[in-house]
Image (tube, helix red, strand yellow):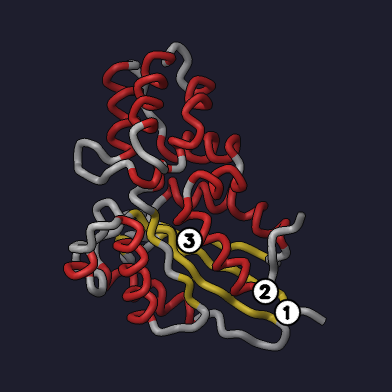
Amino acid sequence: MSNAVILHILCEGPTEQGFADTVLKPYLMEQGITAVKSVSVMTNKKLSITGGLRSYTQVKQDLDILIHSHPDQGYERHLFTTMFDLYALPPDFPEYGTCKKIHDKYSQVESLEKAFGTAVGSERFIPYIQLHEFEALIFCGIDYLLDLYPRSDKQCHALKTILSNVRSPELINDKPETAPSKRIIKEIEEKGNYSYNKPKTGKYVTEKVGIDNLRAKCPHFDKWIARILSAAGVFKLE
């Protein structure tokens, strides 16, 4: 009898949690993972407010509670991961200052994840930090924005031009005015005169694109999915 594998995802906020529940969960369960459960970080425990990273201390506390509350037992195995943005990551994360000096962005984020994993100290934990931001995944399906924001052809063309200048959506940079979400919001809201709904758009576009296409276009995201499947002892079905 094989183990039941339950994956717990600690998300930065509602956009990531919506993606985890709507898009990632069915994909992983199709590959053989028994269940996928998501929760957003606790911002204010007294007021039960969730979402938004304020500090590593906050994250570590949430992870400790999550991991200690779900021990492996019998045929049930629990794995844990995160979905946080590299953009605006709190500077008290382990080895943050050292890792941010690394020029190559893929090496930088992988070094941050390694330090993060070491600090958490659980072999059941798979650290993941999105390079540079969740909205990099939206850049994998710019045309689908037209379904939600009609008459935005010029804006979508502008976003495609940005994408053409990088080898992967993950490399769209993380300055306050040029992070992926800032670029999309500028086009859709300022130039397109729409109110941009991050959680709704995140779920819709990534579901349309599909996990396999996201993996093909985003190498760091692809490694994360591969690590989850490997840790769970399952592999992508052909």
Secondary structure at badge 3 equals: strand
Residue under numbered circle 1: 3
Marks 2 and 1 in Cβ contact (< 8 Å): yes
Residue under numbered circle 2: 233
Quadrant where the N terminus sits is bottom right
Measure the C-alpha gap from mark 3 to mark 1.
23 Å
Q: Position of residue 84 (x, y in %)?
A: 37, 58
Q: Position of residue 175 (x, y in %)?
A: 20, 43
Kind of residue sitting beneath label 2: Gly
65 vs 20, nearest the viewer? 20
Vertical position of residue 42 compared to residue 145: above or below? below
Left or right: 226 with respect to 3?
A: left
Quadrant where the C terminus sits is bottom right
Q: Residue furthest top?
A: 151
Q: Residue furthest right?
A: 1
Measure the C-alpha gap from mark 3 to mark 2.
23 Å
Name which residue lies at 55% across and 80% down: 70
